[in-house]
Structures are given as C-alpha cells and as structure tokens.
Image (cartoon, grey):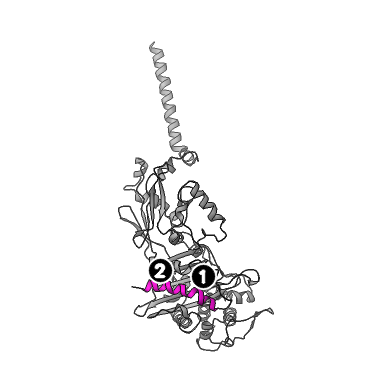
Amino acid sequence: MTRYIRHAAGFCALLLVALLVNAARVQLLRAETYRDNPANRRDTIARYHQPRGDILVAGRPVTGSRDTEEHLRYERTYRDGPLYAPVTGFASQEYGTTLLEHTEDALLSGTDPVLAPLPLWNEFTRSRNAGGDVETTIHPAAQRAAYKGLRSRKGAVAAVEPATGRILALVSLPSYDPELLSGNGETARTAWQRLNADPDKPLLNRAVRQTYPPGSTFKVITAAAALEAGVAGDLDEPTDSPDPYVLPGTTTRLTNGAQGCEDASLREAFTLSCNTVFAKLGVRTGLKDMASTAHAFGFNDEDLRIPFPVARSTFDTTVDRAQLALASIGQYNTRATPLQMAMVAAAVASGGQVREPYLVERVTRANGGTVSSGGSRPVRRAMQPGTAMRLQQLMRGVVEKGTGERAAIPGAVVGGKTGTAQHGLGNSGTPYAWFVGWAQDRNDIQPRVAVAVVVEDAAANRREISGGGTAAPIARSVMEAVLDP
C-alpha cells in the first residue's frame, strides 16, 4: 500500500513540475505571443480602464476623457477639436493614435516607465500609473488668429518664436473634429470613412506633412546664397539682368509679373519680386552654393521631428542650369512645408541662426511633477549675421513699400516676402498664395514671431500680389496676436 502511495505522490509531483514548467514557458517564452494575439483584449481593456493624460495649451487642457461605463471604459474628448487637431491628432479605440497623441502615447496612457515611482515597480505590481500631461508651446491667440484667418480656405499656417524655436501656431484647413473618431462604434466608423473619402483631405496636416512649391518666398534663400557667395554685394547696385531672361541652354523666356525689373538692383528686385533677377542670380551663384545654403536653412533634412515627423522639404541637387534658374525662384522641383518656410523667416529674424522647432514645452506626471522639458534646441548657422541684417532690410522693404503692405502692423517692425507658386500640368492649377515674415514691437530687442502662410485656393490672379492680398493679412493677424501684450 505504501508503495502505491509513493508512486501516486511521485506522479503528482511530476504533474506539479510539468505544470510549473509550462507556466514558466508561458510567462517567459510565450508571453509576447499571447500578449500580441488579437484575441487577447486584456491589454486593450487595461489601456482604456483609466482616464488618459491631457494635452495642454497655455496651461489649460484641450483634451479630456469621458467615462462610457463600457468594457473599453474611457473615450477621448477634445475641446475646440478642429482648432487643435493639427497639434493633438486623435486617439481612437478603433483607429489608433496620431501626432502628439501618438508620439506621447506612452506618457499619456500611463505606460511610460518614467512615471513609475520605482524602477520595475509596475512589472512586480502589475499596475498602471495615471497618465501624464503634455504642455505644448502653442500660443492660443495666435492659433485662433490663424484658424480664423484661413476660415473656409484650404491651406496652412505655421508660426515659431525665432529666439527659441518654440512653435506658436500650427493650423491646417480643412480640419476635423478628432472626438468623432474616439470610440469604436458606428459613429467612429462612419466618421472615419467620410474623412478618408473627402477629396479635400481634412486628415492631412498641411502645416507639416504637405510640401508645396514655395514660389517667390524662396527668393529669401536665393538672396542669402548670393550674398554669402559674394555674387551679390551692394543691395542698390544694378544686377545687369535682362527682361525677359532666356533660361540657359534653352529658348524659354522667363518673364515678370511686375514692371521695372530690367537691370534692377537686388533691393528693387526683392521688393518687386522679379523672377528674372533671381533666376539669373541663382545661376550665377551656382548649384553647389545654392544647395549648400538651402540645406543650411533645413531643406533636404529627413530627420526633423517636433516630436512627430515633418515631411522633407526639397531642393534638387541634380538640376542643370535652366532648371536651377527655376528652382531659385521656388519652382521646378523645389518644395517646402509651411513649417520649413517659417523656419526660413525665423533664421533671418534671429541673425542667421536656425533653431530646431519644437512643440512640447514639458511633460509632467499626474501630480504635476516635471518629467522632462523642451528647453533649448540644437542651433546651426544658415548665414552670417551681416547677411541676415541685409535680408531684414529687404524684407522690411517688401512690407513698407512692396507687395507685402497688407502685413504691416502699426507700431511694429515687420519684414516679409510674398509669393505665388504655379503648379499643375502646364501651370494650370490655381496658384498657391504664400507669405513668410517676422515681426517685433518697436521696443523689442529682436523679433518675437516668424510665420509662414500658404493658401491653396486663393481667389487671385497669377501675379505676385496674390500672396500679398490673400496670405499677408492672415500672417498679420497671427503676428499681431503674438505681439499683443
């Protein structure tokens, strides 16, 4: 009898060992497989079992969480959703996350290890920390001014603080309400299908993910390259430029939208936005120096993040001389995001320095303790301070007596450049209206804001004045909002 008991006990011990080995196998070797299995909803249920941390603008949350009392308990809510959608993105139980909701997801959802009170604390306790908060750099008045200025037009606005790189406004229209996508029911699915089917692409963040031909606003970079290379010197010296200008190696004649461009000085050509002068100037400067200067301003940079990725602005480095002439006036293959062109204006405003733009001022725990801060960003030099000072003079002339007069602000110093970018087959599309500029109060030591505006469907003719008539007033309202005490 004792022998049978011993056998039974041994068999039970063997079963227990087998059970422990299998449990260890599941926990250590198969854990990721089971966790990632679509049928396993434990992680998803845990993710939405508590409120999500908030995204803040000027210290006030523009997001929230609603208790649905369902299995996936908390849904994301948004205050002024369409206004801040290019900043927040969306957090959807059905379609995932985008923009800040995506790049800061670990912190907002409470899974980031930095939120744990002790290292590996959550691994032992199987608990989840309360979501942290993300404080943005957005200036609410500037954001509203940009949104109101664009109104029902398609386009985008980006504004930055030249001295720091802080992003003050990021607007894209048409926009959408991210709250419609928050849940996992029929409302979210219908909204998703409608937004993706919309030919105006409201889900596209035009401020950072869409590139446009920058048109004559690129002449800021061409002027900088020519001045840096010594091809241009005295701003008031005639440039020996014909009107029209025959593109090198071709019979194609490039003309101007303004009178008085023949043999115009650099100052006159910049104020009138003479295509012929800047096309010839780009060719004389040469591809190497043009490409080098464009790169210094941020073109062809594939790694820019704010923290979500920014589309690469491009300046073609394989062009011939005729193509270089067109690229030097912001046409041919030259493409830029509105944020990139705001960085160009900011570089002029800050004495030639380019500061990497950023959108997150700081992130905090739920109790308010700081996890990290945005702080100062990497700086590179796009041009010498003397060149930047001369460009400031040129840009001031555009606003004071040129095509950018509608960007002028009483009591402030404003510099700018208008642009009308042709596009489409045979330039058949409605031209894009551009304005880039900067502004400072007369008592300021340096400019406080740099801005870029692009309007896709501007009701204007093909002359340079469309940038001044359509985009410049929008830029003015944004700059006024920042300068207003």
State yes or no: residue 201 in magenta.
no
Between discs 1 and 2, the one toward the N terminus: 2
Find the distance from the CA under tag 1 to the CA under tag 2.
Answer: 16 Å
SS for dot 2: helix
What is the x, y in percent for residue 40?
A: 47, 39
Q: Which residue is mark 1?
A: 454
| In the image, farthest residue toward the right | 251
Query: At x 54% / y 79%, what residue is drawn?
Result: 465
- Give the quadrant of residue 148: bottom left
* Relative to 310, 78 lies left or right: left
- Bin the neighbour count of mark 2 within 10 Å (Cα to Cα): few under 14, some 14-19, many 20 and up: many
- Bin the neighbour count of mark 1 within 10 Å (Cα to Cα): few under 14, some 14-19, many 20 and up: many
Query: At x 46% / y 55%, what residue is drawn?
Result: 178
What is the x, y in percent for residue 3?
A: 40, 13
Quarter of the figure that contains the C terminus = bottom left
What is the x, y in percent for residue 79?
A: 40, 57
SS for dot 1: strand
* Relative to 246, 51 lies left or right: left
What is the x, y in percent for residue 239?
A: 56, 87
Residue 352 can be seen in this image: no
State yes or no: residue 479 in magenta.
yes
Which residue type does callout 2 highlight? Ala
Query: At x 63% / y 71%, what residue is drawn?
Result: 428
Foreground residue, 453 or 26? Answer: 453
* Residue range (magenta): 464-485
Which residue type does callout 1 highlight? Val
- Give the quadrant of residue 104: bottom left
Q: Which residue is mark 2?
A: 142
Q: Quick check: 151 above or below 107?
A: below
Query: At x 44% / y 62%, what residue is drawn?
Result: 83
